[in-house]
Amino acid sequence: MKYVDEYRNKEIAQKILRQIKSISKKKINLMEVCGTHTVNIFRNGIRKMLPSNINLISGPGCPVCVTPISYIDEIIALSRGENFIITTFGDMIRVPGSTSTLEKEKTDGADIRIVYSTLDALKIALDNSSKEIIFMGVGFETTSPTIASAVLKAQKEKIENLSVLSVAKIMPPAMKALLEGKEVNIDGFICPGHVSAIIGSKPYNFIAAQHKVPCVICGFEPLDILQSIYMLVKQIEDGRAEVEIQYERAVKPEGNKIALDKIDEVFKVVDSNWRGIGNIPLSGLEIKDEFGKFNARKFIVETEETKEPKGCRCGEVLRGVITPPECSLFRKGCSPENPQGACMVSTEGTCAAYYKYN
Amino acid sequence: MCLAIPGKVKKIFNDHTAEIEIGGIVKNASLDLIPQVAVGDYVLLHAGFAIQVIDQKKALEIFRAWEGKVN
Ligand code: SF4
């Protein structure tokens, strides 16, 4: 077992599909809230395999896409300062701010470095003791413990020139906001597997209990996705709403306690602004006051007035209200080479997935 | 961005890091988030950190559930 190819077995996929077809009667919308799921669903042609009564909708599951423009403007303003090195995961570098991107700033001389891990940022801080290193803290619960871990390490090793500009987000409150917004009818959630590897299954319980919407925590290979859809269809046809774990090889009901403790130690839960959705109560993570010196918000910068790209409908795409082809700029002025909105920049953005695979 | 890839733990070092093999390529990763791993375990690697151990028994259940099924 290598835990990858085995889950791409065509014969088993056909069996699951036949079962789905034989039990699925109702017309339903299932939302996947993870960008990695969106890409894998497209790459494997899963939408086309399903019977026509099952509709898959993509949700706000790409951290790059839900990061507000004002945040990009903030980091761009910081990057223009004399003494700063900006460190970031690669996905963020081409996201348009109001008037610029980090990529442009880099060409103009700003010191912006792509890192693979928060620990690389820590190393850059060690090697450049006269500079202030800022890490762009973008991500969901999968990533936030790695940010917390780096902050704790910086504290322990007395590395004081590293700080985080956090827009880290928490997924379940966004799912709640979508349900309460009632713009789309969601009959079941394909829940994010790697977020859940950290948070476990309990944080979704309210969705099943209060909103009566079934949830299945799903792995990322084709068999995982098909089996999760089967489990959701089964719940819906049986009239049940529960939280089930399909991705049992990686997700325990209690999640990863050590990672959760690190998040708790470093971050406090705050209201957070999601691009396209707006402010969601208690859906974000900010560095705690005790760790204030590691919070890049200690550097006060003036930012320009936020400007959304004209005509871009990313917000509606992120809420699952429209599909990208319904945006008049899709393929006409907006493409991965010349993206207007974040949903087209990020490889996990819904617009980019539609562009590449549809 | 929440991509995590399964890899096999090859070596564990004293500083809570490990060598992890993914498809023939060896990567260094931090074990800060799952300290109790052993050489030979498969872990999920995300942004330089192992974030979970793969439960090898549970991993087989999907095959047990479907392989026998004729339909
Ligand atoms: S196609 Fe481009 S302009 Fe339209 S919503 Fe997507 S990212 Fe925005």
Image: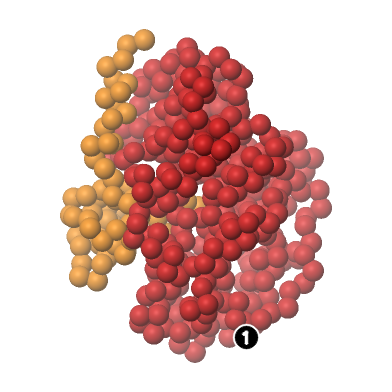
Chain colours: A red, B orange
Chain bearing mark 1 = A
Q: Nearer the viewer, residue A60 or A40?
A: A60
Name the amino acid type tagged 1. Answer: Glu
Q: Name the side, left or right, on which A217 lies relative to B32.
A: right
Q: Name the side, left or right, on which A7 lies relative to A237.
A: left
* Residue at the (69%, 79%) spot, across then down: A301
Residue A183: quarter of image: top right
Q: Nearer the viewer, residue A162 or B19?
A: A162
For this orientation, the residue located farthest to the top is B71
In the rendered image, the quadrant that contains the N terminus of chain A is top left
Mark 1 closeness class: few <14, some 14–19, many ≥20 residues within 10 Å? few
For this orientation, the residue located farthest to the front is A210
Residue B14: quarter of image: bottom left
Percent across and percent down for residue A288 are 51, 73
| Circle 1 SS class | loop
Q: Which residue is mark 1?
A: A82
* Residue at the (40%, 47%) spot, across then down: A200
* Residue at the (28%, 50%) spot, across then down: B53
Percent across and percent down for residue A153 are 37, 75
Percent across and percent down for residue A148 are 43, 68
A323 vs A199: above or below = above
Percent across and percent down for residue A312 are 76, 48
